[in-house]
Image (cartoon, helix red, strand yellow):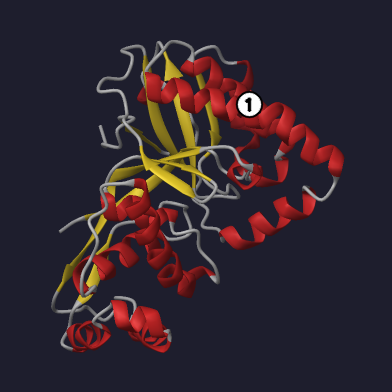
């Protein structure tokens, strides 16, 4: 079984204020269980101890079986980069739940999605201090998901992207931690003026982009650019300094744009083109990875 990475297309930070967020599994990076653990593989036994120490997780999971598997040389082999917002810990958590839950739920309804999300969130909190459960849920169900607060539902992506539009990931080359960035954002939102600008400028743009993404209607590229301009104006601290010149150039470009892809500060940025192919762009030292909006590497 392969557990894919995740990409947050739209909704970073604004989901905190109630906007929707749209995330997809991404097959360009993934992880799976393997045997004959190499020396450099991460030690997961502290994670097992954490799971064992929480009563309802210990009851939900075969923690003894997981520990035995790891001690016998089992490990999670992953190509998902850490510190990039691509769901590296989420894929691991999904893999543990899928293989070692006594009765793993295969969710088919929003209610079942919510139930699984709650378990996965508690599991992933080991890695981040707290977790919404969104990343492991996307990896576990391997389908696009739409989040709004505590509600989550399956999202149907258009079968074919517009021929003239394409998406890509831009690698900043910088690993980062999400927690301090989110803390900075929340502190900023204590200022009523800043919070008001987020709600007036960014939330409507994010909502429009998600609606167009899911409907396949015209105007998605323009909505993407609106989000990009709002993030440039309102979230400068989240844009890596090394990428600011490239982002500034994208604001005036008619055929491409970039925006945050998750918390920012490094990791991946999300890019979109119209009328040109991503590999035709001159992104300087930053490599790019084109992908289909359904989450497949191309």
Q: Is 87 left, or right, of 256 in this rendering?
A: left
Q: Is 48 left, or right, of 259 in this rendering?
A: left
- Asked if residue 105 is positioned above or below residue 252 in the image, the reply reads below
Quadrant of the rendered image containing residue 242:
top right
Q: Is 181 left, or right, of 27 in this rendering?
A: right
Q: x, y percentage for residue 188?
A: 78, 49
Residue in front for this viewpoint, 115 or 163: 115
Residue in front for this viewpoint, 192 or 42: 192
Query: Which quadrant of the figure contains the N terminus?
Result: bottom left
Q: Residue at x 33, y 86 (%)?
A: 45
- Residue 87 visible somewhere in the drawing: no
- Residue 262 visible somewhere in the drawing: yes
Q: x, y percentage for residue 170?
A: 45, 38
Quadrant of the rendered image containing residue 76:
bottom left
Q: Residue at x 37, y 22 (%)?
A: 166
- Asked if residue 63 is positioned above or below residue 297 in the image, the reply reads below
Query: Which quadrant of the figure contains the C terminus?
Result: top left
Quadrant of the rendered image containing residue 254:
top right
Q: Residues within 10 Å of mark 1 (few under 14, many from 20)?
A: some
Reading the image, the residue beneath label 1 is: 204
Q: x, y percentage for residue 191?
A: 85, 46
Callout 1: helix, strand or loop? helix
- Asked if residue 260 is positioned above or below residue 224 in the image, the reply reads below
Q: Residue at x 19, y 56 (%)?
A: 2
Q: x, y percentage for residue 119?
A: 39, 67
Q: Residue at x 72, y 33 (%)?
A: 199
Q: How many marks?
A: 1
């Amino acid at each position: 079984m392969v557990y894919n990475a995740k990409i947050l297309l739209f909704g970073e930070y604004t989901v905190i204020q109630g906007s929707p967020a749209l995330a997809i599994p991404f097959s360009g990076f993934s992880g799976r269980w393997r045997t004959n653990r190499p020396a450099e593989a991460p030690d997961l036994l502290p994670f097992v101890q954490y799971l064992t120490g929480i009563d309802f997780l210990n009851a939900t999971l075969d923690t003894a079986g997981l520990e035995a598997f790891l001690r016998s040389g089992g490990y999670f082999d992953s190509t998902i980069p850490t510190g990039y917002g691509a769901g590296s810990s989420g894929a691991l958590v999904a893999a543990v739940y899928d293989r070692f839950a006594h009765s793993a739920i295969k969710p088919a309804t929003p209610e079942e999605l919510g139930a699984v999300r709650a378990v996965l969130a508690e599991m992933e909190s080991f890695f981040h201090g707290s977790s919404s459960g969104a990343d492991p849920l996307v990896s576990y169900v391997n389908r696009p998901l739409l989040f709004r607060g505590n509600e989550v539902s399956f999202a149907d992506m258009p079968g074919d992207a517009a021929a003239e539009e394409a998406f890509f990931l831009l690698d900043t080359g910088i690993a980062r931690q999400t927690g301090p960035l989110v803390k900075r954002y929340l502190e900023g939102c204590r200022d009523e003026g800043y919070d008001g600008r987020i709600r007036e400028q960014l939330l409507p743009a994010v909502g429009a982009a998600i609606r167009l993404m899911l409907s396949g209607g015209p105007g998605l590229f323009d909505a993407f650019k609106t989000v990009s301009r709002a993030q440039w104006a309102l979230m400068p601290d989240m844009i890596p300094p090394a990428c600011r010149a490239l982002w500034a150039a994208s604001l005036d470009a008619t055929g491409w744009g970039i925006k945050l892809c998750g918390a920012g500060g490094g990791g991946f940025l999300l890019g979109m083109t119209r009328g040109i192919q991503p590999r035709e762009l001159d992104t300087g030292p930053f490599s790019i990875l084109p992908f289909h909006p359904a989450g497949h590497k191309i």
